[in-house]
């Protein structure tokens, strides 16, 4: 995954959840690192990390637009 892809994912989640991109980037990176440490198959980790990042932000009270 390129930096451009990650930036696009972070930007999209930030817009959807009305959260600063810095916060989204940190949560996404932490989640992706956690998944990479545990996974044998790495193909869908960015998708799962994005999904968990959205869920985490929504659970913490951040509402989408």
Image (tube, rainbow, N blue to C red):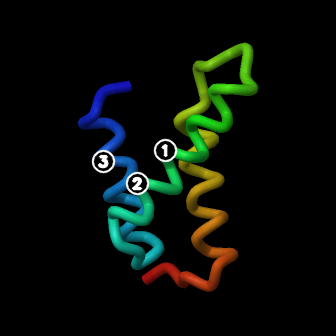
Q: Which mark is residue 25?
A: 2
Which residue sits at x=33%, y=64%? 21
| Quarter where residue 43 is shown | top right
Which residue sits at x=62%, y=85%? 61
Crowd tier of the residue under label 2, counting other residues whose Cα lies within 10 Å: few below 14, some 14–19, many 20 or above? some
| For discs 2 and 3, the disc positioned in front in the rendered view | 2
Q: Nearer the viewer, residue 7 or 31?
A: 31
Q: CA distance from mark 2 to mark 3?
A: 10 Å
Residue under pointer 3: 8
Q: Earlier in the sequence, mark 3 or mark 1?
A: 3
Which residue sits at x=68%, y=26%? 37
Coordinates of residue 48 in the picture (x, y in percent): 63, 41
Question: Where, quadrant-wise, is the C terminus in this rendering?
Answer: bottom left
Q: Dot 2: what SS?
A: helix
Depicted 46 relative to depicted 19: above or below: above
Q: CA distance from mark 3 to mark 1?
A: 13 Å
Which residue sits at x=65%, y=64%? 55
């Amino acid at each position: 995954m390129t930096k451009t892809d990650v930036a696009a994912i972070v930007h999209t989640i930030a817009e959807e959840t009305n959260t600063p991109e810095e916060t989204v980037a940190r949560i996404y990176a932490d989640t992706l690192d956690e998944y990479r440490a545990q996974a044998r198959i790495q193909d869908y980790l960015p998708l799962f990390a994005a999904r968990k990042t959205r869920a985490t932000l929504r659970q913490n009270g951040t509402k989408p637009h």
